[in-house]
């Protein structure tokens, strides 16, 4: 059952959409955490997001960019804004479609189905899914997933890029400059600690899978993947 996440601060509209979409067999969740939407996104891992633009604290454009850092799930904006520039901004910030308020619920359903088909169904790309494997460790870049045995962790897009580079280079060193270029197009504008923070997060994800001291820092060069397993989980 596909999961739809509704990000709408007008509770009346949000509940109306939830009740209508649920009738068609979808699992629908309403977000209440507008201060830290990504916390709820990571918890729910929805297949599609319906996203308003005018939200407390940060607008929908901001949250769509944050989602795109971690996921390629479809995002459909629903907004009372009707200007052409608003629709352009929605698409430029990572949205897949735009619905204006007031809306007809059948239009919403049609667009949801269309985006789900494009992302996961009959219209989805039929190319073979990439899987990188190293000593039992499996990376699924398109899913943003890392697996060992039955244990699975979800990665952000940047964490996935780091793991892909480390596994591609294994047992060689992945250079710092190469990683910076892969993760951020122009490394000149990235603080030195930014890569370190992301490496630390990847180390923690690997520890969750039972891999100890997984990423070795090679002074003056970069990072190298080390495979030292605990007993496999699951």
Image (tube, rainbow, N blue to C red):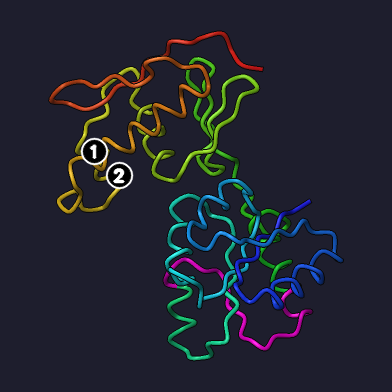
Q: Look at the image and give the residue range highlighted in magenta.
A: 92-109
User: Do tag 1 and tag 2 residues touch (Cβ < 8 Å)?
Assistant: yes
Q: Residues within 10 Å of mark 2 (few under 14, many from 20)?
A: some
Residues at marks 1 and 2, CA–CA distance in whole angstroms? 6 Å
Position of residue 88 measured from the top left corner of the image (x, y, whole percent)? 45, 80
Q: Where is mark 2, residue-wise?
A: 182
Q: Describe the element under mark 1 as helix, strand or loop.
A: helix
Q: Is residue 113 above or below residue 199?
A: below
Q: Where is mark 1, residue-wise?
A: 178
Position of residue 133 measured from the top left corner of the image (x, y, whole percent)? 51, 24
Q: Is residue 188 magenta?
A: no
Q: Nearer the viewer, residue 72 or 214?
A: 214
Q: Describe the element under mark 2 as helix, strand or loop.
A: helix
Position of residue 179 measured from the top left corner of the image (x, y, whole percent)? 27, 38
Q: Is residue 195 above or below residue 9?
A: above
Find residue 153 and report its image quarter: top right
* Residue appearing at x 54%, y 17% in the figure: 136
Position of residue 70 measured from the top left corner of the image (x, y, whole percent)? 47, 49
* Residue appearing at x 53%, y 90% in the figure: 82
* Residue appearing at x 47%, y 19% in the figure: 134
* Residue appearing at x 39%, y 34% in the figure: 201
Classify residue 96 as left or right of residue 186: right
Q: Residues within 10 Å of mark 1 (few under 14, many from 20)?
A: few
Classify residue 49 as left or right of residue 110: left
Q: Nearer the viewer, residue 68 or 20?
A: 20
């Amino acid at each position: 059952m596909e999961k739809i996440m509704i990000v709408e601060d007008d509770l009346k509209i949000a509940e109306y959409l939830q009740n209508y979409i649920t009738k068609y067999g979808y699992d629908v969740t309403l977000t209440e955490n507008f201060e830290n939407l990504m916390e709820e996104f990571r918890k729910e891992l929805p297949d599609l997001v319906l996203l308003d633009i005018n939200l407390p604290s940060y607008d929908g454009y901001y949250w769509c960019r944050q989602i795109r850092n971690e996921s390629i799930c479809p995002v459909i904006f629903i907004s009372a804004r009707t200007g052409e520039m608003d629709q352009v901004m929605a698409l430029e910030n990572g949205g897949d479609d735009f619905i204006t308020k007031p809306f007809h619920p059948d239009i919403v359903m049609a667009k949801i189905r269309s985006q789900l088909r494009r992302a996961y169904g009959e219209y989805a790309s039929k190319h073979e899914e990439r899987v990188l494997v190293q000593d039992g460790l499996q990376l699924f870049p398109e899913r943003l997933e890392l697996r060992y045995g039955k244990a699975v962790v979800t990665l952000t897009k940047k964490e996935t890029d780091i793991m892909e580079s480390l596994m591609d280079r294994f047992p060689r060193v992945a250079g710092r400059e190469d990683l910076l270029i892969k993760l951020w197009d122009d490394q000149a504008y990235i603080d030195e600690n930014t890569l370190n923070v992301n490496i630390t997060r990847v180390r923690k994800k690997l520890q969750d899978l039972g891999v100890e001291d997984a990423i070795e820092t090679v002074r003056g060069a970069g990072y190298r993947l080390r495979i030292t397993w605990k007993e496999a989980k699951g």
